[in-house]
Image (cartoon, grey):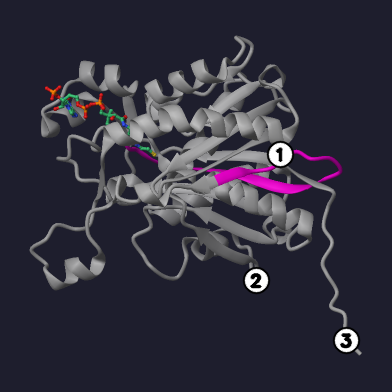
Amino acid sequence: MTVELRSSVGAAGARILGVGAYRPPRVVPNSEISEAIDSSDEWIVSRSGIRSRRFAGADEPLGSMAAGAAGKAMAHAGISAADLGCVLVATMSNVVQSPSLATDVAARLGAEGVAAFDVSAACAGFSYALAMANDMIRAGSARYVVVVGAERMTDIIDPYDRGTAFLFGDGAGAVVVGPSDTAGIGPVVWGSDASKRDVIGHDSSYLEWRESPERPWPVMRMDGPQVFRWASWQMAPVAQRALAAAGIEASDLAAFIPHQANIRIIDTMCRVLKLPKSVVVARDIATTGNTSGASIPLAMEDLLARQLAPSGGLALLVGFGAGLVYAAQVVRLP
Ligand SMILES: CC(C)(COP(=O)(O)OP(=O)(O)OC[C@H]1O[C@@H](n2cnc3c(N)ncnc32)[C@H](O)[C@@H]1OP(=O)(O)O)[C@@H](O)C(=O)NCCC(=O)NCCS
């Protein structure tokens, strides 16, 4: 006789219950960056929309920034560390290979015995992790999941590289996802284009660096114009598919929260999506820069904290980055 296995059963739906942010206090204007890359405030503003970003100091390790954002999201959601079933951290700038950053965050939160792991999907990492949290809760693998995007991009950027030095910043954002009677997170539309794997990524491995210590520390390099074209034109259709998968129209949205990569990419996506004027568009790249995996939760927290988007409104999220990888979903704002 075949022995039948039991399957876990979760909630009917999942939704974001709280959001939190950690922004390093040090504000770095373009004027502080431009000399090293022979650039100017005017060039950086006109090509990227960025006026300033935050840089973390030596006393702000990645784990502490991530736990700071997670703790605020948990307070907003009204849950304690004992309620957590999983800590999920999206990051591309953790320079420690093991243990995972998520276990560091779990320890800092006092979440004893909780499942914890990292997700590696670069600037799409938060959107990937959010999709996984949604599935975990509906499948019954966890009841509450804290999803964190945390980056110290300054640790993996060459401050003399004209193509990247002005774009990136440091910070952490987090959401708590929990059970809900109805869907608060729409189906994810995700994918990859591995033929463009060389377009963004580290310029060498740690092994190569160990073999030839005269090489510089591995840093991120990017073919900016190629990424720009791909993101501007390929991501709006992905966003459109996420709207269709959730069964809603652009006019049902309260907010559009795309990955904060470049203001011109955001503006192009808005034009292609034909977003009605009633939809608030996250544009905190101006004062945050591109914080990779942290950018979407940071932008969401900013919109809600400044009451630019309503709690309970629908928001379209689109993450994209190195891989190249992407993920989009519609969520109900906490
Ligand atoms: C990086 C980026 C802002 C560069 O803008 P761009 O308009 O594509 O600029 P280009 O690289 O084509 O360079 C245009 C000119 O500016 C110059 N330039 C490049 N970097 C410069 C800098 N930091 N400061 C001043 N001038 C610069 C170039 O030398 C070139 O000069 P030329 O016309 O005399 O040859 C843009 O490509 C971009 O945002 N790409 C997407 C990046 C991104 O979002 N990455 C993360 C995705 S997750």
**Of callouts 2 and 1, which one flags the residue occurring earlier in the amino acid sequence?**
2
Question: Which range of residues does the magenta coloring cover?
Answer: 168-190
Is residue 126 rendered to the left or right of residue 3?
A: left
**Residue at point 44%, 37% (across, down):** 23
Q: Residue type at mark 2: give it.
A: Gly
Q: Which residue bears the numbered disc 2?
A: 113
Q: Which residue bears the numbered disc 3?
A: 2
**Of callouts 3 and 2, which one flags the residue occurring earlier in the amino acid sequence?**
3
Does the rendering let one see residue 96?
yes
- Quarter of the image holding residue 38? top left
Task: For the residues labelled 3 and 1, say whether their Cβ atoms are less than 8 Å apart.
Answer: no
Q: Secondary structure at mark 3?
A: loop
- Quarter of the image holding residue 212? bottom left
Q: Is residue 203 magenta?
A: no
The single residue placed furthest to the left in the displayed view is: 214
Q: Residue type at mark 3: give it.
A: Thr
**Residue at point 64%, 11% (across, down):** 278
